[in-house]
Amino acid sequence: MSQITNKREILQPILDSIEAGWHIKKPSPLVPDDVEELCIFQHPKTYREVQVAIANSQFWDNGRQHEIEPIVRYAIQNATRA
């Protein structure tokens, strides 16, 4: 059976490769394997926030970065000011 791994460990390098300064608000550091699919990213210097749903299946067994990265990139490109 597949398991969700630490989503934050998968997401932060993706965010950093797209644009420096993004922080993960959700999933929280206290629950990095949160089963809720909603992810929230914030860029405090530019006052932007992104809310995006990423299927849990894409995080199974250490994640499928090649599937997650385009979702995150698109969300950041369309980010609005918080």
Image: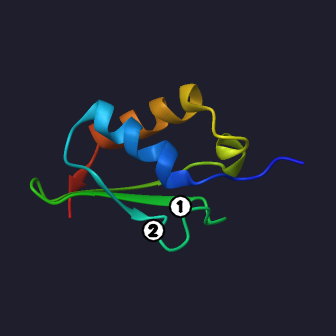
The secondary element bearing badge 2 is classed as loop
Quadrant in the picture for residue 64: top right
Q: Residue at x 46, y 69 (%)?
A: 28
Give the Cα distance between marks 1 and 2: 15 Å
Residue at x-position 49% and y-position 64%: 27
Above or below 71: residue 32? below
Give the class, few, some or many, for how many residues have Cα within 10 Å of label 2's Cα (few <14, many ≥20). Answer: few
Residue 53 drawn at (x, y percent): 54, 53
Quadrant hosting residue 42? bottom left
First in sequence: mark 1 vs mark 2: 2
Please name the amino acid that badge 2 sits on. Pro
Name which residue lies at 9% across and 56% down.
Answer: 45
Residue 60 locus on image (x, y percent)? 72, 44
Question: Mark 2 = which residue?
Answer: 29
Does 65 sit left or right of 59 as displayed?
left
Describe the element under mark 1 as helix, strand or loop.
strand
Could you say where residue 77 lies in the image, as x and y percent from the top left? 28, 36
Query: In the rendered view, does 9 fall on the left or right side of 55?
Result: left
